[in-house]
C-alpha cells in the first residue's frame, strides 16, 4: 500500500467539488473526488482518490499521492492526491474527507 505514496497519478473526477453523492443526495462533496485511470482497486473498479489543491470543480487531474486512507471495514482504500505536491497535514486531510469517511473505520497512512 505505501509503495504508491510519492507517485504521480492522473485520472478523472466523477464527483466534482459541490456535487451531490449519487445515492445519498444530502451528501455534498467539499473536495474533488475521482479515480485513477487504469488502476483497479479492491472493489474491482478504478482506484478512488480525493484530490487536494484547488477550490473549484475540475474534470481531470494529475498529482502526487501524499497519503492513503485505509478503511478497516471496506475493500477499498482511498488515495489522497495533491495537485501541486503540497504535503497537507493529517488534520487537514482528515477534516476534508470526514464528510464521507465518517461512515467508515480507518486510518491515514503516510
Image: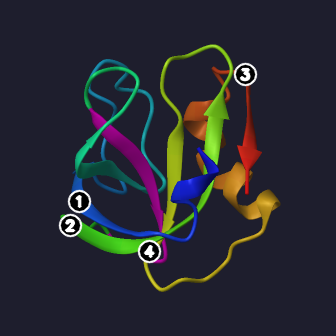
What is the distance, in whole Å, between disc 1 and disc 3 at their CAs?
26 Å
Decide which of tag 4 and tag 3 comes sooner along the chain.
4
Hey, which quadrant is residue 9 in on the image? bottom left
Residue for badge 1: 11
Dot placed on the residue nearer the N-terminal end, 1 or 3: 1
Instruction: Identify residue for label 3.
Output: 105
Percent across and percent down for residue 50 are: 46, 53
Query: What separation in Å lies between label 3 and label 2 (alpha carbons)?
Result: 28 Å
- Left/right of residue 104 with respect to residue 37 in the rendered view: right
Residue 2 belongs to magenta span: no
> Residue 45 at what x, y percent from top left?
25, 28
In magenta, the rendered stretch is: 46-56
Indicate which disc, 3 or 2, sits on the residue closer to the N terminus: 2
Is the residue 104 above or below the residue 80 in the image? above
Rendered image: mark on residue 60? 2
Q: CA distance from mark 1 to mark 2?
A: 6 Å
SS at mark 4?
loop
SS of the residue under disc 3 = loop
- Report crowding for label 2: few under 14, some 14 to 19, many 20 or more residues within 10 A (C-alpha): some
Question: Foreground: 27 or 77?
Answer: 77
Give the distance between the C-alpha atoms of the residues marked 2 and 4, in whole angstroms. 14 Å
* Residue at left offset 55%, top offset 71%: 6
Pointers 1 and 4 in contact (CB under 8 A)? Answer: no
CB under 8 Å between callouts 1 and 2? yes
Relative to the observer, which residue lies in front, 60 or 110? 110
User: Viewer-nearest of labels 4 and 3?
Assistant: 3
Is disc 1 placed on a helix, strand or loop?
A: strand
User: The N terminus appears in which quarter of the rendering?
Assistant: top right
User: Mark 1 or 2, which is nearer the eye?
Assistant: 1
Q: Nearer the viewer, residue 65 or 23?
A: 65
Amino acid at each position: 500500500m505505501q509503495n504508491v505514496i510519492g507517485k504521480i497519478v492522473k485520472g478523472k473526477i466523477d464527483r466534482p467539488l459541490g456535487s451531490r453523492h449519487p445515492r445519498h443526495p444530502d451528501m455534498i462533496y467539499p473536495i474533488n473526488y475521482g479515480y485513477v485511470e487504469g488502476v483497479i482497486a479492491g472493489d474491482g473498479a478504478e482506484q478512488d482518490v480525493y484530490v487536494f489543491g484547488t477550490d473549484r470543480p475540475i474534470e481531470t487531474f494529475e498529482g502526487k499521492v501524499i497519503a492513503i486512507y485505509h478503511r478497516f471495514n471496506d475493500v477499498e482504500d482511498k488515495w489522497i492526491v495533491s495537485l501541486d505536491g503540497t504535503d497537507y497535514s493529517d488534520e487537514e486531510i482528515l477534516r476534508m474527507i470526514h464528510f464521507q469517511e465518517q461512515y467508515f473505520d480507518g486510518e491515514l497512512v503516510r
